[in-house]
Image (cartoon, helix red, strand yellow):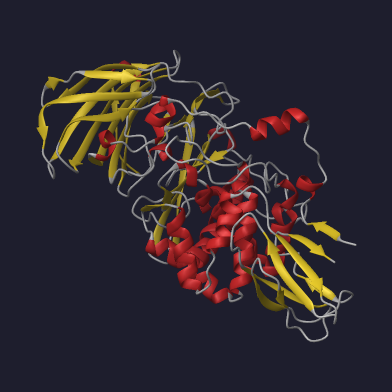
């Protein structure tokens, strides 16, 4: 008789309704608009963006924006036509090149311009887009995109942008694809003079202009992805401190609402930021943006990993709005938004997925960074308990990798399932010094770079000297999880194999006798004797705590 044990509650004890089952089987249909947004056509790859100057005025009362963006680029090859992106609800007032207007056309949210003569390969050139309109209003930021128009408790405007996934072109014209990050940028934002705008990078100048507005000029010195560019407008107070890190002194700035300028709240942020930087520089290497500093900016929405200007809305409390998703208690010892969004400075902002399909790279590693924060301050056991406690949140509804070239990410399981997968890889590597070096090495090897699935798989496999290709294929590109089948032959000797969606799947796993030390056993999809003297059905023990698998014994 067979006994089947599945090690996740949410998948195996819940049944799908007929309608849900049909929806899961339905093939997603993508449109030309999806391809224009997500595909790297010759009209996008023909130029490499090097510098932007975004100059925008925000009319809060009318929820209206107007301004321009300078595109400075280097021609990758000869061309006369290129594509940039801007949502079609915003007007393009003109496109200017060398003092003359260029003709343009629009298709969905893509814009095409034609130059009067060939732009030759290697040439550095520029054009400016002037635009205006009422941008899309986010109704549930940061989970949907656009402008978040709110007011603080004193009735003062409290405005922010958040556009991950939807795209930065929801509010400003740019080359809106993750594979090409601008090298540097100037962000100039004009707001009513009694308010402050906080954006990415360093504040280099402010100036009072006509009509009661003030312009804040922010310089970004490091490469930055479009969706990270942010406006944060409010009645802020500002304070600063210095963090002494691996690369020297790091400027740490805080912008919080005037109403929250209270000692306990300020100390809460300072403590969590300092501890987070300490833990993550240990595990991942130096903070990747010393030149631009590190900022926490209070927002009405919960949070977002805006590079060097992290959006914070967790109400100055530990946990995720006071909750611990792991139900272990470890998640309430630190501020979730400070830790998680700061983790993205390494995974998401330093190492960026070239296609939205691989957003799992951002979210899996950053989810796992929460556990490593716990590990640094409370120990490995606490870290593993946190990872294990999060498992009931896994749905296994679809792969955590999305389809390529259509601006579509995979399942939300990229968070918890991805973190569980990485904890499992650490368990297989079975050498925490080596594992730390791998994580630090990733951030050094792919410093300020765009990567894909194979880059991550190859690096971890090569550095660990363990082939993790089939493990990644199963947990990233497939929906389910592998099942470990253990049986005993006629003489009572144990045999094991994997049942998997991946042909030739192989993964080492820790197996042993109850109460004893477990051995790392290499198994494939073919039955193999498990060489552990004295192992029987009765004393068999598998590390089901750190391995996210099904188990079948007979």
Q: Nearer the viewer, residue 525 or 70?
A: 525
Q: Residue furthest left?
A: 117
Q: Among all residues in the image, which is located at the extreme front?
A: 490
Q: Quadrant of residue 425?
A: bottom right
| Residue 379 in view here | no
Quarter of the rendering occupied by the N terminus: bottom right
Percent x, y for residue 159? 49, 27
Q: Position of residue 305 (x, y in %)?
A: 49, 44
Q: Residue furthest top?
A: 62
Q: Is residue 404 visible?
A: yes
Q: Quadrant of the C terminus?
A: bottom right
Q: Residue 325: percent from the left, percent from the top? A: 72, 48
Residue 220, percent from left and from top = 32, 44
Q: Is residue 264 left or right of residue 72?
A: right
Which residue is situated farthest in the bottom direction here? Answer: 533
* Residue 262 in the figure: left or right of residue 385: left
* Residue visible at 62% across and 71% down in the picture: 428
Which residue occupies 29% across, 40% down? 185
Q: How many numbered callouts?
A: 0
- Along the viewing direction, whichever of 437 and 335 lies nearer the viewer: 437
* Quadrant hosting residue 56: top left
- As drawn, 386 above or below 56: below
Res 375 quadrant in image: bottom right
Depth order, front residue of 191/308: 308
- 8 vs 192, left or right, is right
């Amino acid at each position: 008789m067979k006994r089947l044990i599945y090690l996740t509650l949410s998948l195996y004890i819940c049944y799908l309704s007929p309608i849900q089952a049909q929806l899961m089987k339905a093939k997603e249909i993508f449109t030309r608009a999806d391809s224009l947004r997500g595909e790297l056509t010759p009209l996008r790859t023909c130029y490499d963006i090097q510098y932007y100057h975004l100059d925008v005025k925000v009319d809060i009362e009318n929820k209206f924006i107007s301004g321009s963006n300078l595109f400075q680029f280097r021609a990758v090859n000869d061309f006369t036509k290129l594509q940039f992106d801007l949502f079609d609800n915003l007007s393009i007032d003109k496109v200017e090149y060398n003092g003359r207007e260029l003709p343009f056309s629009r298709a969905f949210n893509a814009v095409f311009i034609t130059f009067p003569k060939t732009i030759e390969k290697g040439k550095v050139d520029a054009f400016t887009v002037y635009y205006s309109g009422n941008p899309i209003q986010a109704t549930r930021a940061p989970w949907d995109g656009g402008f978040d128009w709110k007011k603080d408790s004193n009735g003062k405007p409290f405005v922010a942008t958040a556009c991950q996934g939807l795209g930065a072109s929801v509010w400003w014209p740019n080359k809106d694809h993750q594979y090409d990050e601008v090298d540097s940028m100037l962000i100039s934002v004009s707001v009513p003079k009694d308010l402050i705008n906080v954006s990415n990078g360093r504040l280099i100048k402010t100036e009072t202009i006509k009509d009661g507005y003030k312009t804040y000029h922010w310089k970004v010195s490091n490469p930055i992805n479009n969706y990270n560019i942010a406006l944060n407008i409010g009645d802020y107070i500002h304070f600063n401190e210095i963090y002494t890190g691996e690369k020297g002194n790091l400027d740490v700035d805080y912008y919080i609402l005037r109403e929250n300028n209270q000692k306990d709240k300020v100390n809460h942020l300072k403590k969590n930021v300092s501890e987070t930087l300490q833990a993550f520089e240990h595990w991942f290497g130096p903070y990747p943006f010393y030149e631009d500093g590190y900022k926490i900016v209070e927002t009405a929405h919960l949070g977002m990993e805006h590079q060097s200007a992290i959006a914070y809305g967790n109400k100055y409390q530990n946990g995720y709005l006071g909750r611990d998703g792991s139900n272990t208690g470890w998640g309430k010892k630190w501020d979730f938004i400070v830790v998680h969004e700061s983790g993205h400075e390494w995974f998401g902002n330093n190492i960026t997925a070239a296609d939205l399909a691989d957003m799992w790279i951002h979210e899996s590693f950053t989810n796992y960074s929460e556990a490593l924060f716990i590990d640094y301050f409370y120990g490995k056991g606490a870290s593993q308990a946190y990872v294990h406690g999060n498992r009931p949140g896994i749905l296994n509804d679809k792969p955590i990798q999305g389809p390529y070239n259509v601006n579509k990410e995979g399942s939300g399981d990229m968070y918890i399932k991805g973190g569980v997968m990485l904890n499992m890889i650490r368990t297989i590597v079975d050498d925490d010094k080596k594992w730390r070096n791998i994580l630090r090495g990733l951030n050094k090897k792919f410093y300020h770079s765009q990567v894909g699935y194979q880059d991550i798989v190859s690096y971890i496999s090569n550095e660990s000297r363990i082939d993790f290709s089939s493990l990644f294929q199963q947990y990233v590109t497939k929906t389910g999880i592998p099942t470990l089948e253990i049986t005993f032959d006629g003489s009572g000797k144990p045999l094991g194999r994997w049942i998997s969606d991946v042909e030739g799947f192989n993964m080492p796993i820790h197996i042993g006798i109850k109460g004893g030390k477990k051995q790392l056993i290499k198994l494939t999809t073919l039955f193999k004797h498990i060489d552990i003297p004295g192992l029987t059905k009765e004393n068999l023990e598998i590390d089901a705590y750190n391995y996210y698998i099904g188990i079948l014994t007979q």
